[in-house]
Image (cartoon, grey):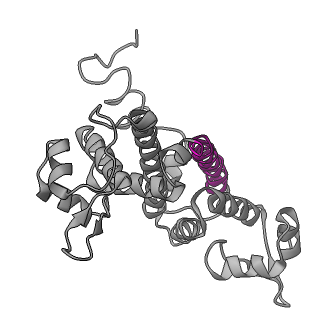
Amino acid sequence: MRPADLAREHGISTQAIRNYERDGCLPPAERTPTGYRIYTESHAAALRAYLALVTAYGHATAGSVMTALHADRLDEALTELDRGHAQLLRDRETLAAVRAAVGHLAGGVTGTGLPALPGARTVGEVAHRLGVTPATLRTWEAAGILAPARDRTTGHRRYLPADVRDAELAHLLRRGGYLLDHIATVLRQIRTAGGTGELAGTLDGWQRRLTARGLAMLAASARLDGYLVLRPASPAGLAHLTGPIDPKGPMGPMGPTGPTGPGKPAGKAT
């Protein structure tokens, strides 16, 4: 295949193909006696895998995965994919937390079950309402969860209704076991949307984006697996991972995770 043959399938330039090879996203191509590159079906599979990874994980992760593979660092490539899946899980958990919080705060009722407070409140008043100490509220402020204004004369914190709502939400999520950095992420989402009412209208779109990312990761995994099968020079140890499983191996059907694991005889399967 020529660079143009690979480029045509994806609607990209031949220079992009050369750049991907230069950057290690494609395996090195052989050359004709006159210096022209020769690409194979393995290169085409690598390109499909790389572009699918870009869609699912972004350019940085896609590049890291492919360059690690071409340097025979399979576990490093898999670790990059694991990080992407872990981030998706964190995003799903954040969405679930926002949904729960918006549900609790809808209709002007706070996480304490009390009506929303009008006007500005002091840190002591808000702490008393939540049943926490003022030091706890200051810790949440340092973590980026709360951002109360200051009185210009005294310098004291002034909690407006939106600040009290944020404190209520933080308290609700802390009782649910969420860490401070996770709660800060939730509060940023709400502030960006303009409040819980506006945020409620964006949650379905957020869910659709997460679902699309998950499906893109699934498709990228299939493309990457197809490339690993075609690779002319597999990383050390890859052959036994992609080939038949040894029935006598520790992870095979007859090993600890198979039907004849601990507590079962190694005789005829029942």
Q: Which residue is drawn at 30% across and 63% down?
A: 148
Q: Could you tell me if residue 182 is visible in this image? A: no
Residue ranking furthest to the top: 270
Front residue of 170 and 112: 112
Give how far across and how far down residue 243 sits, in percent. Answer: 55, 44
Give how far across and how far down residue 189 sits, in percent. Answer: 47, 54
Front residue of 151 and 246: 151
Please give left or right for residue 181 compared with residue 77 in the image.
Answer: left
Give the residues in magenta: 201-229
Please give left or right for residue 109 compared with residue 141 in the image.
Answer: right
User: Does the magenta-highlighted stretch encompass residue 161?
Assistant: no
Vertical relation: 202 (above or below) 28: above
Give how far across and how far down residue 204 sits, in percent. Answer: 60, 40
Front residue of 50 and 54: 54
Which of the image's four quarters has the N terminus? bottom right
Please give left or right for residue 6 compared with residue 29 in the image.
Answer: right
Q: Which residue is drawn at 83% across and 78% down?
A: 14
User: Does the magenta-highlighted stretch encompass residue 207?
Assistant: yes
Q: Residue at x 29, y 40 (%)?
A: 172
